[in-house]
Amino acid sequence: MSPLTEAIREQLMANDPEYQRLHQEHARYVAQLEQLTCKPYLSEAEQLDEIRLKKLKLRAKDQMEMLVRQAMSGACAAG
């Protein structure tokens, strides 16, 4: 990851409520998935929940990356 990308992520985390919300959402999904992976056996409902959580986690990550790309294009246009 480039220093510019990391700086933009830090700036978004500090100043962008949508990015902050997505980051918290992503962290929550990660924690829920970790709880499921600690179990030796998952019921059918838990397996479906695991799939759902993985999709939600990926969606949050994609949305965060979209915000980073938008900020980068704005930074490049301004610079």
Image (tube, helix red, strand yellow):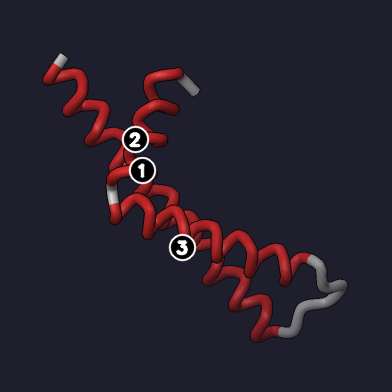
**Tag 1: amino acid:** Ala
Relative to 49, does residue 22 appear above or below in the rendering?
A: above
Residue drawn at x 72%, y 71% as measured from the top left: 36
Q: Nearer the viewer, mark 1 or mark 3?
A: 1
Circle 1 residues within 10 Å: few <14, some 14–19, many ≥20:
few
- Image x and y of residue 6, in percent: 44, 27
From what the image shows, is residue 64 above or below residue 24?
Answer: above
Q: Nearer the viewer, residue 22 or 57?
A: 22
Q: Tag 3: residue type? A: Glu
The C terminus - image quarter: top left
**Image-quadrant location for residue 46:** bottom right
Between circles 3 and 2, the one closer to the viewer is: 2
Residue type, numbered disc 2: Gln
User: Callout 2 environment at 10 Å: few (<14), some (14 to 19), or many (20+)?
Assistant: some
The residue carrying mark 2 is 11
Percent from the top left, x then y, of residue 38? 81, 67
* Residue bearing mark 1: 14
Q: Are marks 1 and 2 in contact (CB under 8 Å)?
A: yes
In three-dimensional space, the C-alpha distance between marks 1 and 2, rounded to whole angstroms, equals: 5 Å
Instruction: Quadrant for residue 74, please give it.
Output: top left
Give the left or right position of residue 74, taking residue 65 as reference: left
Circle 3 residue:
25
Residue displayed at 38% across by 20% down: 4
Q: Position of residue 25 (x, y in %)?
A: 46, 62
Q: CA distance from mark 1 to mark 3?
A: 16 Å
